[in-house]
Image (cartoon, coloured by chain):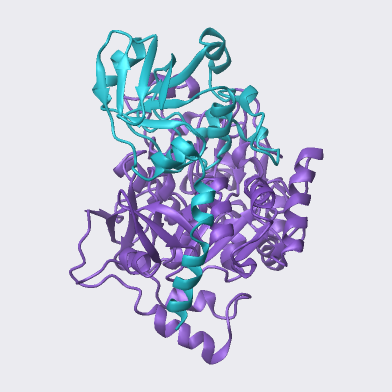
């Protein structure tokens, strides 16, 4: 019987069928960070003698607040560090760390056909590799570390065919926002979004990660992209991958991880991106977005309008901003930084702007290209790698009422600080907005520069 | 098991976990003592909790618990004495976290929510899967048959621990 990509991965990991459409599912890999790991690790230590199923299947990453900002976060980092050392778990700590969803792939810790769990909702990012990558709670993550498995309800599968060419400034971020707006903020709930089509095949791994990163924002269990040559060449030579023939044998196995012709899906949609243009969110969930040249919709919910300080009909381009942020597990990889730098080169930001690379490795690669000079010459703050302002946990928290354009994934009330207002967009749109001091796109900026030159 | 108590009427959809507990309260290493932060990320949340101080059951609209996977959302609800959340739909991760922390995620039809928001208290029979409003009206619901055991007797991690030998045997077969 023909199988979807998801079915192939799922079926290869079911240890035991359980009541109620549940299954005991083997977990190949666990990524553990300092915010959500200590609770499960301590529970294992208290009740199960500090045993783990297989420490070699785990990596630990201090990522959310690193370096620590206070005593409490220092304790979190220390607990993760000590636990990792005790179990000889590979640890990426200050200096070699970054956002776990950026670090895990760049270290080659995720690969096609795997199941992977992490106590973080944006674990779906790693579905870009054709893995079944799942965000879970601390208890479930602890269970996966203790027993090598999880209880999961078998999700439904939605095939998302994407056709056309991203153009006119549209990026993978805009595609991600468009998918959420199409499905609705909870329209993916209960589904795995299995991406398919030539457009997906044409995307880089960075772009696929951006796309899969936001599957959770449609409520989906995760996103998945079919692995292909782009995937294999990304992984070749990475730290956790074998070299030579051993790697090439893995590639041969990975080539079978494509949806069979005639595979059945619970739902299917097709999205054409030819007409897609840069989007920006206006509301308080990522489904509430419109093209950058659009207006706040007439049917906008009152709650979203009140929180964002907006009225229906207001042009997004008219909105002055107080801060700009480029970073997060959505858009902080080298290609994202290049896109932002392209816009900022030779220009100056007019609002406080933070640029935070997704990992220390990304930071170093960006600096080898001189991108840090571009950002700093433009007047932006270039930081170490971190989750940063995205979740309002450490540096860059917004003041109440402050309006921020951000390359992140969530515009929830209070997400980047109590009362702070977040507009989600691609790195290029964030960079252009930072120059303009209001929401805007790079094509406007060309006009601004020309005017300056003519004057 | 019966869950009976006063209702916290939360007439909102898409209550995300950042609103339930903002990230700046995620700095601990334990799952206890988080009730004091409950709903501090929500506009009017503190006032609402003060008004319904004795509530132990949340009634809300669709997509409750969306967003971040932080189990702190379930921990803060449990620590504050909440035993159930009634809503037309839940986000997956919160749904799982609720079961693992003694909070019944009770799914009812969207058209039932108005009456439930008006009900000062509700009575939830978890085994029989029947919810009763204070006007006597009843609403049936279905719990996940496996996770219901975790809810009634705890022990998600204990269940997984009981499977370790089976999992190792399965893995050995896979490798061969």
Q: Is residue B147 left or right of residue A187?
A: right
Number of numbered tags placed on the structure image: 0
Please identify the quarter of the rendering in which residue A12 is found. bottom left
Vertical comparison of A451 with A246: above or below = above
Vertical comparison of B39 with A409: above or below = above
* x and y, in percent, of residue A10 in the image: 36, 64
* x and y, in percent, of residue B110 in the image: 27, 25
Please identify the quarter of the rendering in which residue B20 is found. top right
Vertical comparison of A434 with B86: above or below = below
* x and y, in percent, of residue A334 in the image: 59, 62
Towards the viewer: A402 or A213: A213
- Chain B palette colour: cyan
Please identify the quarter of the rendering in which residue B78 is found. top right
Towards the viewer: A325 or B160: B160
- Chain A palette colour: purple
Quadrant the C terminus of chain B occupies = bottom left
Q: Is residue A412 left or right of residue A290?
A: right
């Amino acid at each position: 019987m023909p199988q979807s990509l998801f079915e192939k991965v799922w079926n290869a990991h079911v240890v035991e069928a359980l009541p109620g459409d549940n299954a005991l599912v083997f977990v190949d890999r666990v990524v553990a960070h300092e915010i959500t790991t200590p609770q499960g690790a301590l529970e294992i230590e208290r009740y199960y003698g500090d045993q783990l199923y297989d420490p070699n299947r785990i990596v630990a990453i201090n990522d959310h607040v690193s370096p620590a900002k206070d005593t409490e976060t220092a304790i979190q980092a220390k607990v993760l560090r000590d636990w990792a050392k005790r179990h000889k778990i590979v640890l990426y700590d200050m200096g070699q760390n970054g956002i776990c969803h950026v670090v895990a792939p760049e270290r080659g810790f995720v690969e096609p056909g795997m199941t992977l769990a992490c106590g973080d909702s944006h674990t779906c990012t790693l579905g870009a590799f054709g893995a079944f990558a799942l965000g879970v709670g601390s208890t479930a993550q602890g269970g996966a570390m203790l027993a090598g498995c999880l209880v999961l309800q078998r999700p439904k599968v939605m095939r998302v065919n994407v056709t056309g060419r991203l153009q006119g400034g549209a990026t993978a971020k805009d595609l991600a926002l468009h998918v959420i707006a199409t499905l609705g903020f909870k329209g993916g709930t209960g589904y795995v979004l299995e991406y398919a089509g030539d457009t997906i095949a044409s995307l880089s791994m960075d772009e696929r990660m951006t796309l899969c990163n936001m599957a959770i924002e449609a409520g989906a269990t995760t996103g998945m992209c079919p692995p292909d040559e782009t995937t294999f060449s990304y992984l070749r030579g990475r730290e956790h991958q074998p070299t030579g023939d051993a790697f090439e044998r893995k590639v041969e196995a990975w080539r079978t991880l494509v949806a069979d012709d005639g595979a059945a899906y619970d739902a299917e949609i097709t999205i054409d991106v030819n007409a897609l243009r840069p989007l920006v969110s206006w509301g308080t969930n990522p489904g509430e977005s419109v093209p950058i040249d659009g207006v706040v919709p007439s049917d906008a919910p009152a709650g979203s309008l009140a929180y964002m300080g907006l009225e229906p009909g207001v042009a997004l381009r008219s909105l002055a901003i107080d801060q700009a942020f480029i970073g997060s597990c959505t858009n902080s990889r080298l290609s994202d930084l290049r896109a932002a730098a392209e816009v900022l080169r030779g220009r100056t930001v007019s609002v406080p702007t933070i640029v935070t690379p997704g990992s220390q490795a990304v930071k170093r690669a960006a600096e080898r290209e001189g991108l840090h000079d571009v950002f700093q010459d433009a007047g932006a703050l270039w930081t170490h790698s971190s989750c940063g302002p995205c979740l309002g946990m450490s540096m860059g928290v917004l003041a109440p009422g402050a309006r921020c354009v951000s390359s992140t994934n969530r515009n929830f009330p209070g997400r980047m600080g109590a009362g702070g207002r977040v507009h989600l967009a691609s790195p290029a749109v964030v960079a252009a907005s930072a120059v303009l001091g209001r929401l805007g796109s790079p094509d406007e900026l060309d006009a601004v520069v020309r005017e300056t030159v003519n004057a | 098991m019966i869950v009976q108590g006063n209702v916290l009427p939360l007439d909102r959809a898409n209550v995300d976990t950042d609103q339930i507990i903002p990230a700046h309260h995620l700095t601990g290493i334990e799952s206890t003592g988080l009730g004091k932060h409950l709903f501090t990320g929500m506009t009017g949340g503190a006032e609402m909790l003060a008004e319904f101080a004795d509530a132990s059951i949340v009634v809300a609209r669709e997509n409750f618990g969306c967003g971040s996977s932080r189990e702190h959302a379930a921990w803060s609800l449990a620590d504050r004495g909440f035993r159930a959340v009634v809503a037309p739909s839940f986000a997956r991760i919160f749904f799982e976290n609720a079961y693992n922390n003694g909070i019944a995620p009770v799914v009812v039809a969207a058209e039932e929510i108005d009456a439930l928001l008006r009900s000062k208290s509700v009575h939830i029979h978890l085994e029989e899967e029947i919810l009763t409003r204070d006007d006597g009206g009843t609403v049936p619901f279905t719990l996940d048959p496996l996770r219901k055991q975790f809810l009634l007797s705890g022990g998600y991690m204990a269940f997984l621990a009981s499977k370790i030998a089976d999992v190792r045997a399965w893995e050995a077969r896979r490798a061969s």
